[in-house]
Image (cartoon, grey):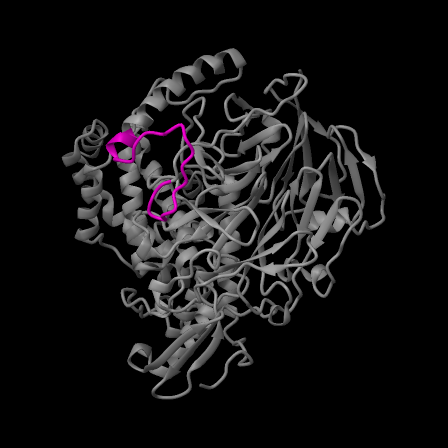
Amino acid sequence: MLPAILDRARQGDEEAFGALVRAVGDRCIFIAHRILRDANLAEDAVQVALVQVWRELPALRDLDRFDAWLHRILVNACYAESRRRRHFTSDVVLLETDSRVAADDFLTVNDRDQLDRGFRRLPPEQRAVLVFHHALGFTVPEVADHLGIPLGTAKSRLSYATAAIRAALEADARTPGLEQEQLA
Amino acid sequence: MTKSRDPNALLSAYLAGGMEVLPDRVVDSVLDEVHRTRQRTVLGPWRIRITSQAALGTVALVAVLVVGGAFLITRDQDGIGTPTASPEVSASPSQPAVVTATPTPTPTAEVLSLDLTWTEVDIDDSVQQVAWLGDRFVMVDDTGAVSTSTDGATWRALQPGEPDPGYADLLKGRIVTWEDDVIGWWNPEDGPDYTNKPPVTARDILTIVQPPADPFESTPFDGRIESIGIGPLGIVAHVHSRLNYATEVNWDSWVTEKLGLRTNNDWTCCVKDVTFQGGVLDITLTNGPGLHVVWADEGFLPGDYQDRGFGWYSPDGVEWTAIPSDIPPTLDRGDLPAFPTGMGEVVGVSDGFIARGVTPEETCTLPDGCSEMWHSADGLTWRNLGHPSAEQDFFSGRLLPWQGGALLTDGIGRFDFWTSDGYQALPMAAELPAHPQEDEVVLGTGPFGFVSLRLDRMEILVTRDGVDWELQPTPSAMDTDTDRRVRTIAVGERSVLYLTWSGYFGEGPLVPHLWVGTVEP
C-alpha cells in the first residue's frame, strides 16, 4: 500500500500525503523526541521534516529508498531545530522535567539522571546514531545508510557517544562543587 | 545491587522511553501547511554533473531562466512583490530585504578558468593547519614550524623547528582576513596552551586577540569570542556571556538536579521569584535555598557557544568599545534580547560590517525564524536589513566575507549575497541534490572566489563572481577515510588548498593530506 500512496503523493495528491503522514508520523516523533529530548522541539522538527518531504517528494526517484530518505530529512530537521533553538532559548523552560518520559523499572532515578546528563551533552549527530542503533535496532551500516554518512563516521560517532555515556555513568560520584552556588 | 550496569543495556532502556504517537494537532498542522505549499518541480535529470564551461554556460542560461521565472511567480503569490531596481532597505524586522545587491566580478588582467586540476603535495605528518593570509599560503605544524607558499605546491620553511609567535599562534586559533589584514583569536577553552597568555600583537600583518582565561575578570571581553569580522573600518567581535569555562560542570543538569532536590521535583510550586540580569539567573524558593548561577541559552552548559551574544568594536584590535544595547536581558520572552545583545556571526564588508542577530519573537511574523541581518557603517550603530525568506532555514549555513559583501551559504544550494543594500539570492547553474549534513560541506573564500567541497559526493562547486559556476568531481584519492571533522579549504589567487586527514581517533595516527587545486588562464 505504501508505494501506491507514495506514488500518488509524489504526484501532488494531498489526500494520499495525509495517509502517508499518518503512516510514518509516529515513527518520526519516536525518532525526533529521542534525539532532541524535548517534546516541543521534536514536534517542530517532525512538522518541518514532513512539509519538506511533501515539497521534495517529486525528486525522489527510487521509492524503495523512501525510508532512508525520510530519515535523512528528519534527522537534518532535528539538527536544524537543535541549532535554531539554541539561539533563542533564554527562559527557564529548559529546567522543566519532561513528564512524558516514563520511568523505567530497569533504570533507577540515578541512572536516568546520569544518562540524561550524558545524552544531553552529546551533539545531535551523535545522539542520532545512538537512537538509530539502540532505539530502532539498526545495524551500524544501516545507521550510516539512513543518516547519509560514511560507515566510518557512523562507527566513530557511535564510539564517541557510547564512551561519553559510559563516562557519564561512571561520573556519579563526582558531583559538582558548590562554589558557584549562593544561598538565596 | 543486582541490576546490570552495562551501558548499552542502560542506554537502550533509557531510549525506550519517550513519545511514540504524533499528536493529531501536529498532523493537522502539517497537512494545513502542505495545502499551502507547492511541491518541487523536477527539471531534467535528477543529478547534473557539469565539468565543462560550455556545458555549464548552456545549463546556466536555462536554469537562470527557469528558476528566475519560478522565483517571480513565487514572490507574486506570496504577495511580497518582485525585485525592484532601486535600493530599498527594510527597517522593519517583519519585512524581507529587497533584492538589490549584486556581486561584481573581480577585475583581473587575465581570465582564469574555473576548472581545478588537483594534485597531492607531500607534507609532513605533523602539519596541523593551512590558511591564505593576505598574499600567501601559510602552513603550520604541531611544533610551531611555519612554511609559506604562493601557489600551494612549493613551500618555503619560515622558521623550521622554531615556534613563531605570529603565524603559529595565529593558525592554532581561528582567523579572518580582509585584504592584507588578518586577525586571529583564541578562547580559554581552546586548550591549556592558550590560557594565561596575554594578547599577542604579532609581526607583519597579524593581530591576535584573546579573552582572559577567567571570564569573570575579563576586560574587554566578558566571555567567549565566537566570531570576529574584520573590514576596512576595523573589527567587530561577537562575544558570549560570562561562563566559567574552567569547570567541567554541566550546569543545566546540575541546576535541574538541585532544583529537583529542593522542590521535590515540582519546583514550579515553590518558586518565589526569578530574576535574570547581566547573564546571572537568580531563583528564590519559598521552601528553602534558591540558586544563583550564570546563564547560557541552552542551559547552564559551560563552553556552550550558542548563548546570547554581545558585540564589541575596535578600530585597531587594541582599543575596544562595547556596542551599546538598549534592551537588558530578562527572563520575559517578550524582552528577549534583541540585536546587538543577541548578536550572532559577523563579517567585515567594504562599507562596514554585516551580522546576524536575534529578533524578539513578538516582532517576528515569520513562521520559521526570528533572526535577521544587520549592517553597521561604524561598528557601533546597527541597521536592520531584514530577513531573506520565510522558506529558508535562516540558521543553516555560514556567513563568509566575499566580494566586499557577505555570503550566507550552505555551500550547495543557498547563496544569499548580502550588502548594506539588502541581499540577492544568487542563481545556481544546476540543481543540486539537497540535504547534506552541515559537517559534510567544507567552504572557503579568497581572491580566487568561492569554493565549496561537498564531502558526501566529493564534488567541488566553484564560482569567482556568483554568475559563472563550475561543479566538478574530484580525484577519488581525495576522499580519505577519517573521522576527523575539521578539514580546511584555503583559497588563494589561482590555487585552492584542501587539507584533509586519514585514519581514526584511537586507531593509529591521523595523517594529514594536502591537495592543491590549480587553475590555468
Q: In the image, is residue B198 above or below residue B144? A: below
User: Where, quadrant-wise, is the C terminus of chain B in this rendering?
Assistant: top right
B441 and B478: which is toward the camera: B441
Indicate the position of residue B297 as horizontal and vertical percent values.
44, 62
Picture quarter containing residue B353?
A: top right
Indicate the position of residue B206 as horizontal and vertical percent values.
74, 47
- Taking the spot 81% from the left edge, 49% from the top edge, the residue there is B164
What is the magenta range? B74-96
Indicate the position of residue A41 as horizontal and vertical percent values.
33, 55
- Taking the spot 66% from the left edge, 53% from the top edge, the residue there is B185
In the rendered view, does B349 fall on the left or right side of A78? right
Indicate the position of residue B370 as horizontal and vertical percent values.
37, 51
B82 and B478: which is toward the camera: B82
Helix, strand or loop for the magenta stretch, by majority: loop
Quick check: is B94 in the magenta stretch? yes
Q: In the image, is residue A18 above or below residue B329? A: above
Quick check: is A46 in the magenta stretch? no
In the rendered view, does A35 fall on the left or right side of A11? right
User: Where, quadrant-wise, is the N terminus of chain B in this rendering?
Assistant: bottom left
